[in-house]
Image (cartoon, rainbow, N blue to C red):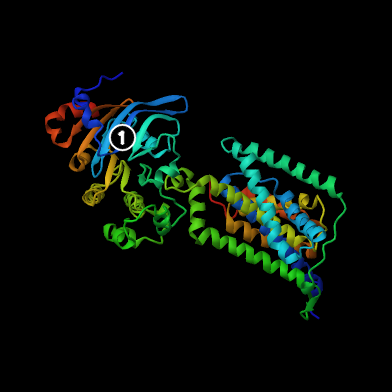
Amino acid sequence: MFELLGIPPQALFGQVLLGLINGSFYAVLSLGLAVIFGLLNIINFAHGALYMMGAFVSWILLKFLGVPFWFALALSPLIVGACGVLIERTMLRPLHELDHLYSLLLTFGLTLVITGVFQYSYGVSGKPYPIPDILSGGVNLGFMYLPKYRAFIIVMSMLICFSTWFLIEKTRLGAYLRAATENPEMVSAFGINVPILVTLTYGFGVALAAFAGVLAAPIYSVNPVMGNDLIIVVFAVIVIGGMGSILGAIISGFSLGLVEGLTKVFYPEASTTIIFIIMALVLLFKPSGIFGREA
Amino acid sequence: MTPMSDNLLKDPSEAVATDALLNISGLQGWYGESHVLHNINLTVKKGELVTLLGRNGAGKTTTLKAIMGLLKARSGSIKFGDAELINKPAREIARLGIGYVPDSRGIFGSLSVMENLLLPPKIADGGFELSAIYELFPNLKERLDSYGNKLSGGEQQMLSIARILRTGARFILLDEPTEGLAPVIIQQIGHTVRRLKAAGYTILMVEQNFHFARKLADRHYIVQEGQVVDEFHNNEIEANLEKIQGYLGI
């Protein structure tokens, strides 16, 4: 068997796979944040908590109602997305005219409240969520062993990222969204209901977070703080990709996951900090992010 | 306070003419704390091309924004057909069949020309088909895939008008269509406006360029310090040229 710089290929490909899986979550989560930031100009700090809610809702659906994974994959984002709609309507809308800082504080507070409610109700220990039968096990590719469910995560998140990109960049609805991002007043002067567009966009971004949460449930432990560490990295990812850039969020999500995985192989000590080092470098040399438009 | 001209009051019955499509009375408007529209009274009849003339900052653009619902702090009455617009949001006003071509042109830079063109939803039948729009603005057809922010000022102006024509709106608020454009483009815009008038569109136009306005319009209102202070039919222009030039400071 060949070796690369003294690293056995099993370890290398294993970490690449792990990196891609982390990257899948980074991409879907930062995509949701980018969609929300683009139109609402809100830094949605509650994104990690809503991701956790997505995982928890699918666990509750399974445990108490016997709803299987495949239905939860659609149902949980809908339920959590509806919560997002409610949050936008009742809490974020009144802050619309104020500085960003207010919505940032509000969503930060919401994170504490949501996390607290789940901790109080279900404790801090992780809940098990089984991998659906059809996706359990794996295939031996010769150079590595590929667990089916992990491959499924990567494929699903690429699919959802591509669909979202297509929806926003290539459809009429997406054109409304991009136009409203640029000049909401003009869009409303064409007879388009911009407030509803804003509410649905927030709901959609939140649903993306919940979708990532459902995908995560079978491989990470479902617990109230599962979003906390992840969201910090995701914020670094969108700073690197460029705030509000759809393509930037997707590409930097996957590639930073990959970079993180490779760092684990070649210089494990830096694996948890590499993304932040890259963020610092990007902020130094291109403050608007790699794919961001200059302000 | 600016004194009202006798011209405005000589035939009050005309001001409330039953065939008025737009009838504005006692319109007041505010930008935050500052009171910018004091007393706007005007009517526009179906098929008419009416201009608002006046110096910079007189309140012409603000009047159009108030009609469109983009100036939210407003009071008085703006009747469009049977509908009262004064408390309606912009999106409902647009749906009644009013198209807005702002002085900033309002082209979306991150959208292609085609996307800009297709953006305003159709609100009524009888709008221009794309083929008719390309015939009216051949330059746009060449640039469908370009992004809005790559267009010249003239192209942006044409796109801004073109996308409204698609919607089926029959009443157009046209804010300074010639601003900053080269004479040859101004000619083309003038030609377009004339064709729209011939096709039965009703147009309320704000214009700094008096020579452009007098070649096209049926009537002119003079706006000063947030009030309509005078009114002239286009055939009265010659006789009142000095007075008008005084109003406009030209």
Residue A125: % across, % down: 88, 53
Q: Residue at x 61, y 49 (%)?
A: A202
Task: Establish if A205 lies above or below B35.
Answer: below
Residue B242 appears in the rendering: yes
Between A123 and A163, the residue placed more toward the observer is A123
Quarter holding the C terminus of chain B? top left
Q: Which residue is at the far left?
A: B239
Task: Say which residue label 1 marks.
Answer: B23
Task: Establish if B166 lies above or below B177.
Answer: below
The residue tagged with tag 1: helix, strand or loop?
Answer: strand
User: Would residue B147 appear left or right of B142 to someone viewing this image?
Assistant: right
Mark 1: few/some/many CA within 10 Å (<14, 14-19, 20+): many
Residue A64: % across, % down: 81, 58
Image quadrant in which you'd find residue B34: top left
Residue B67: % across, % down: 37, 37
Residue B249 appears in the rendering: no
Q: What residue type is labelled 1?
A: Asn
Between A157 and A144, the residue placed more toward the observer is A157
Quarter holding the N terminus of chain B? top left
Between A286 and A90, the residue placed more toward the observer is A90
Chain ID of residue with mark 1? B
